Image (tube, coloured by chain):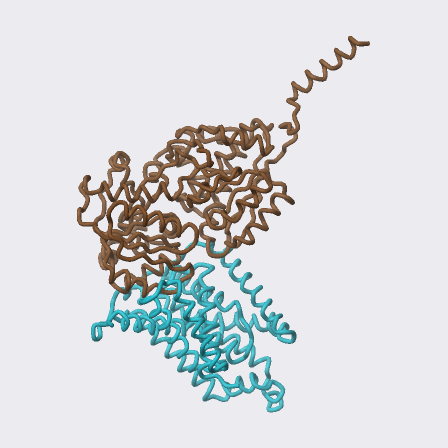
Amino acid sequence: MRGFRVTLAAVVLLLMAAIGFSPSAPAAVQEVLVGELLPLTGNFASLGQQYLWAGQTAEDIVNNDYAGLQVPLGPGKGFPSLGGATLKLVVRDDQSRGDLARTLAEQLITVNKVVWLNGDGTSGNTSLLQPVVEGFGIPLSCHPCASPTLTDKGFKWFWRTGPNDRTMVASVFSFLKEWPDHGGPRDLKTIALFSCDNLFCQDNHKIATELATRDGYQIVASLTTKTGATTLASEVQRLQAANPDILFLVQYPPETTVFQADAKRAGWTPKVIATSNGAYSDQTWLVAQRATNGAAGWIGRDPTAIDLASQKPAWKQVNEIYKKYSHGQDMGELAMREITGLLWMADVINRAKSVDPAALARAAEETNMTPEQMIIDYKGIKFDKNHQNELATGVVTQVGWDDQKHTIWPWDLAKRAGYTMIHPNPSWAERDAKPKPR
Amino acid sequence: MTLVLQAVVNGLEMGLVYALVAVGLAIIWGLMEMINFAHGELLMLGMFGAWWFSTTLHLDPLLAIPPVALVMFGVGRLIYTLLMRRVQRGETFAQIFATIGLFFFLQNSAVAAFTSDYRFVEGGLLSRLSGINLHLAGLSVGLPLLIAGALALVLFLALYLLVERTEFGLALQATSEDREAAMLVGIRPQRMFAVAWGLGAALVAVAGAILANFFAAYPQVGFPFTVLAYAIVALGGFGSILGTLLAALLVGVVQSVTVVYLPPAFKDAFVFASYLLIGLLRPQGLFGKF
């Protein structure tokens, strides 16, 4: 009898091992539900729609077999380690409102039972989500969010693969500092800072103030305006009166458009317009500039050398998938950041072999992704103690007369890009006179 | 001093643009006393209308004004007939919630139809003139905004004459003041309300068609203008066309001059502070009557 029991126990153990028995056995998961909380309407809708298209692209890549695509979970269908379970994004629109985002986050976690929350794509609203998600103990990610405070707070469940503003604004100032040694102007002495007023804007403003002071620029004007401005004529007047060599501009697309109109009316163009995210990262704004040459000569920071990254076969293939959802629009850098982050998330889920939060967190912490697996040219993905990707990089680009971004810093990448910079920033009359790219 | 004077000029120019936006609301809210929180969405439709004309038919967006006005007149009437006529019988709150619902419906429909991309009209007369300024006594006046301002003045004059000097205008005023008495003299109030909504929608859509030359068209563009339009109509005095115009100019100047001296964050704060101040001294607004 004792021998029978031992044999029975051994058989049961063997069977359990064979089917990989665990509380979250792969066979038990048919669909991996990920909450995608986005600003699809309201002030940030133009950003939200790009994140949605990026999400649909990532979902498509994971769930379908793209044999030759060298990104995580490109080849094969679904999550191999979860028995081919598919990725399902549960999309919710928070109307660009932080309070609604919090409510929807709770709903997604408690009612929809999502195992991961991605969103909301803007730093201010994401900062409101963090404490909620931290309480529930599931992973939260926001890859295009750039405010350093999101990771500085040391939340256990928040992850960001994209670079933060400290990295990216520093890139702009490194470029400006090193530019004279690479044939750039030596007469840039004064700077004006003009930004919007939410968390992302204030962080940028603060970092730029610190760096400008450190690098010896005289700050001749420092203005902050609220989003939703119908006119910026007086702000432009003040900036014009301050006559800075460099304008550091951080505004969302609608306000940037108003600024452009008012600056044109005032006939004012500083020698350099340097921007940080906001409109400069918004592909819809960039595309719209083709009609007016409005962005030609503008300098900005990007997480990737988009002109070089777009030469990668994987980038081209992912872009074709993205265009299925974006009404033919190419991926901008925001979409690239989001897709990279979502494919990293898929890789984490696959490596975790489970949707258990602790297993997901462990797999996320163990991440060591190499650049070859990405459509963006980060040096890799590896997290510091605050879950900020320490290998995320910043580059500086300039919009050319072709309305495309060209890498101008770091210098080795700039050399590879082979672009001749526009300087000084063209006047409005010159923009009008030049042929417009279509 | 030049800085301040230039700010005043900028403010007056912008004020005329605000007047253009507020004029439709002056009819619906100011004159007919019906609330319309979807006012900015009608503006947005006007902007998209002009954009569609200029990109599809390759016409100057200014030429889109008559067809846009005509279509939006119909839309306004339809909104009244299908929605507002019914909620008008109930509490004011019903109007508030109905037009907030309309606000979301129109905005989200625009997102579905056009996406949230920013659309710019190209090659129109006003776009081509952008950057051209007239210089008077050391002050610079933007020509395109000046033309838009002149159009606003023409619209105001036409509206003033319509409301104050025609039988139709008097019928509108009579309906607003006492619906039953108006009925006794043969006025059909519901027809008057429907026409007022049509007129209001057409006017704000015309404003949209002009504004499309200066601002990007996108589904959320209307809201900041709606907020200002409400302040302007209340400030000018309910039912006063002239008051609306002057209040719009005042708002433009207050916004503009404030920023010359104070952080831009105070810009709208001072606009609404002006409203509070005038509200304390003249609760009926600058030119309103009790």
Q: Residue at x 65, y 18 (%)?
A: A18
Q: Which chain is brown?
A: A
In this view of the protein, which residue sits in the foreground, A385 or B129?
Answer: A385
Q: Which chain is cyan?
A: B
Across and down, in percent, residue A157 comes to: 53, 38
Question: In the figure, is residue A106 to the left or right of A409?
Answer: right
Across and down, in percent, residue A303 comes to: 37, 40
Q: Residue at x 44, y 72 (%)?
A: B273
Relative to B101, is B185 above or below?
below
- Judged from this view, the residue extending furthest toward the bottom is B185
Across and down, in percent, residue B133 comes to: 25, 69
In this view of the protein, which residue sits in the foreground, A6 or A327?
Answer: A6
Across and down, in percent, residue A203 comes to: 39, 49
Relative to B230, is A150 above or below?
above
Relative to A371, is A198 above or below?
below
Residue A340 visible within the image: no
Residue A272 visible within the image: yes
- Judged from this view, the residue extending furthest toward the top is A3
Count of numbered labels shown in the rendering: 0
Quadrant into which the N terminus of chain B falls: bottom left
